Image (spheres, grey):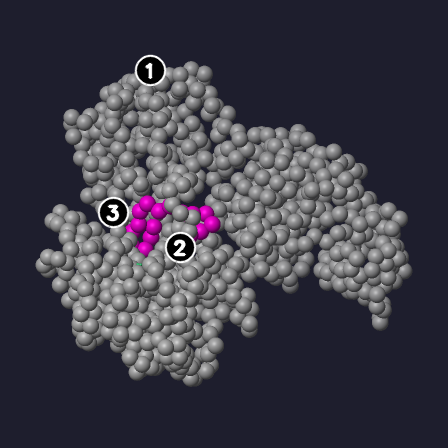
Amino acid sequence: MKDFSLGIKGFNMVAFWTDLVKEIWKINGDLAQLDGEYDLNFSFEGDVAAVLKVMRVGCDENFIDLQTSALQYLSEQAPSIPVPRVIPTSKGELYLSVTGPDGESRIVWLQEKVSGKTYANFKPQNLPLIYNLGEVVGSLDRAWLGFDHAGLVRDFKWNLMSAVWIEAELSVIQDDSRRQLVTDVLSQYQRIMPELASLKQQAIHNDVNDYNIIVSGSLTDQAKVSGLIDLGDMCASPRICNLAIAAAYMVLGQSQPEQVIEALVAGYHAKNPLTANELAFLWPLLRMRLAVSVVNSSLESLQNPEDPYITISQQAAWQFLEENKVNQDLLISRLRLVCGFPVTESAPRIMRWLDNERGNFAPVLGVDLADASMRSLSVEKSVCPQNPFELTGKEAEELGGNYLAEEGVWLGFYNEPRLVYTDKAFRKGRYKASNRRTVHIGVDAFGPAGLEVCTPMAAAVAFSEYRSDYLDYGGMVILAHTTEEGDLFYTLYGHLDSESITSLVEGQMLEKGEVFARLGGLNSNGGWNPHLHFQLALTTKGIGDNWPGVADPDELVLYNSLCPNPAALLNLDDDKTEYQGTQKACVLDKRRSHFGENLKLTYAKPVMFLRGWRHHLFDEWGRPYLDSYNNVPHVGHAHPRIQAVAADQLLRMNSNTRYLHPAQTEFAEKILSKMPNELDVCFFVNSGTEANELALRLARAHSGGKDMVTPDHGYHGNTTGAIDISAYKFNAKGGVGQADWVQLVDVADEYRGPYRVDDSRRAQKYAGQVGDAISRIERRGGKLAGFIAETFPSVGGQIIPPKGYLSEVYRRVRHAGGVCIADEVQTAFGRLGDYYFAFEQQEVTPDIVVMGKPVGNGHPIGVLVTRRDIAESFAKGPEYFSTFGGSNLSCRIGKEVLDIVDDEGLMQNARLMGNELINGLKRLQEKHALIGDVRGCGLFIGLDLVTNRETREPATQVADYVKNRMREKRILMGTEGPTDNILKIRPPLTIEALDVEMILTIMDQVLDEARSLLSR
Ligand SMILES: Cc1ncc(COP(=O)(O)O)c(C=O)c1O
């Protein structure tokens, strides 16, 4: 920071400038000095919020005149553009020369303060924000088209049009490879210079960097640019330079720079349409800006060798230049497309020509395909592969079914999302839930190995190769074709017989209909069921001879344009080969019309899942999600053993408990083997709700009472009786209210409840409330039937009660003649890692245990286990029967689930992974003040989010933000608790270490975002 005193000892500078503002602008307020490289900047808070700029001695007046007039021009011509306004003096001047306290003359001016944060300090730097920045920059350039000023013509180091100055300074870069890199960037720039020089020049900002962009946003509103500041580098230059400079800053540190540039350019183009010609300059200019930047700072560090900041600030630029991972040709295609231009100039002509010629091409497989059947391999319609992370050899060999001669050739769809591409090469990140390429952008033709492959029209062989990797193409050929109008396009043929293509040479001409290859068998086609992969490309720029045959569903705009549906070349209608999956929007509409409104969907943007595997789910496009939320698929989604026993039983019969069946007793034996000896009678029902209803009846039958005691905010089911004991529902908005036979006690929550972790008698105090409730029942003349609680309250906020709590509660309840019911619907069967049931942690044996959800792994099963004497009391009443409870099918599934937990060591996995997750979350808690409490046991985990650790103010909006952002980043989790501020994590028990790492990494990022959005 500059010397604030201007060298005058004991002089009150703030008072001086404050008085000056008062005198010149006739406003009152307080000044505070801000950072500034050369000038004095003060923030002014008072009658207005402003920034006072006191320029350095000798500052060129023309330069200030340029900036102030440019801003003034905007406030008159385009007031909606977010730039700070100049506040004129009381006499109407935009700036003024004054004599400072040191007797020197300085120019002063006052600018409105823009509210928000610098982009550099803002998170998330997401695509909608970058699009908005593009809009702002576009609007600005458009508005300044009409602005002129003598000061705009500046030949200085930051004008990209004169950036060639770095050529003479390259020796400052010591590292040879870095110097070579910058030399290359410079040559590319020099090649475009002549054309660039012919572009119209206009006033541009010229320095849209992270610190000159002010952003404001909140947890609930998408952030927007609230101001572009600092016109210190303004000059006249082509507008594409302005955009390229902004792009150069936006890409740094971003994992998907192409998308960032796309968003920025799309926003710009929407406000200030670009020409296709200009787009081609963007990339070389972007790199040139970074080159200027690194050369400039290398020079600066020569002058200030002690200043490490200079080098650090250039790291990101070097990294971006060195990584060089943007495919420049594809980038141009992307930018053309987002601006509404065809992918190439010739693309529309080629497509028109192909359409006209449809029907006249030679048959590629020698047969007419008009009646060929279509078979789907889609995420929605096919179950291949069973494991979407690993296609087996057998599945590849039998893909789509075995070929039957009488069927002729059958076809696979274009644009079909498939899960068969399981190799890591299709994945775009470290995790199983990272984006992956799933959408097939060719047409498949399945036929017998050896079938002849012909060229649909005259061609030149462009490329042929044998790709020997397993599940690659085997033999593959690319042919080049020319339309009658002279436009070049290409076709690709994959999975060919390797022998059949050995004689092909590049450039070899083929006549229409000429046989040039044969379909490969398993040994030469990459190991697939014999078929031809047939693909069209309108250019090979950017893809060379390595065409992606499968694209990321989020990049289809590019790949569908580059490689459109090749149906015309097969003499087929596009509709025949174009995949049409079920549209999510359509399902959503139908859901709205067919179901009631209180059937809620999770997430602001709902998801549709069509496949699952272990702890991952896949949406209709095959996008994978890590499921850290669903506790029903206890042993994992789509477990093959469950599928096998269900299929087997359905082949046999399915009936109820009125007949003998070994599956029922075997399931009972399995469950009872996990229970304390006293609990020896099972009841089978269909759901947790039904089990709790039954538990109520048993308790009443046994105790002779009706009244129940239960903790607040509990949930036990959705039927009338179950809701009466579920405060979470009866006390909810529009709920039925509390029944007179129900007494509530506090949840034994040692973080938020009345008795907290620092109170050594908290367990007894919470239990004491049950004693009070029993007294209330006695006072109202009722009789206690029992106590029911989720052993670890889940909807109450993933709570682990203090040890000793339930033993004291049970003692009191039993003393009053009541029955103790443990609702273990959420917690049973090994989820807790150290305990098979949660009541074990509390060292109690309940009188009744209720189980549901996970025991069927998705199949509807509920179970109640109790003591013989209680069952006998109940048996004194009418016959007990539940049609579907104890069906043979359900019993076999239930037993299989419990066997899998044992066989696969899932309880142990829950302990290991749960500890890893809980410890990791505790580490995050040290960094993020938003995490008030981390609690859990095994894979039953809660994260209590707070806006203030002292007051424990629930951070409900943050929790909602985190849940939705985690979903956008492909992780499912929920929110819970009375104020919905608790993140609930309870994945299937199959979760692995890398998934835990993903949760922790993404959670860290998302909490950073939330913190940034909350702070001012
Ligand atoms: C603790 C608890 N008990 C009972 C139920 C009701 O089970 P179901 O939905 O199977 O009827 C639930 C459901 O979420 C629950 O969490």
x and y percentages locating residue 273 in the rendered image:
61, 32
Determine the residue positioned at 15% across, 55% down: 656
Looking at the image, in which quadrant does ligand 1 appear? Answer: bottom left
x and y percentages locating residue 717 in the rendered image:
34, 61
Classed neighbour count for the residue bearing mark 3: other residues with Cα under 10 Å, few (<14), some (14–19), many (≥20): some
Q: Amino acid at mark 2?
A: Leu
- Mark 3 sits on what residue? 386
Report the mark closest to the observer, 3 or 2. 2
Q: Is residue 902 magenta?
A: no
In magenta, the rendered stretch is 600-617
- Mark 1 sits on what residue? 360
Identify which residue, 741 or 473, lies in the foreground.
741
The local secondary structure at tag 1 comes to: loop
Determine the residue positioned at 69% across, 42% down: 80
Report the mark closest to the observer, 3 or 1. 3
Whether residue 851 is visible: no
- Mark 2 sits on what residue? 972
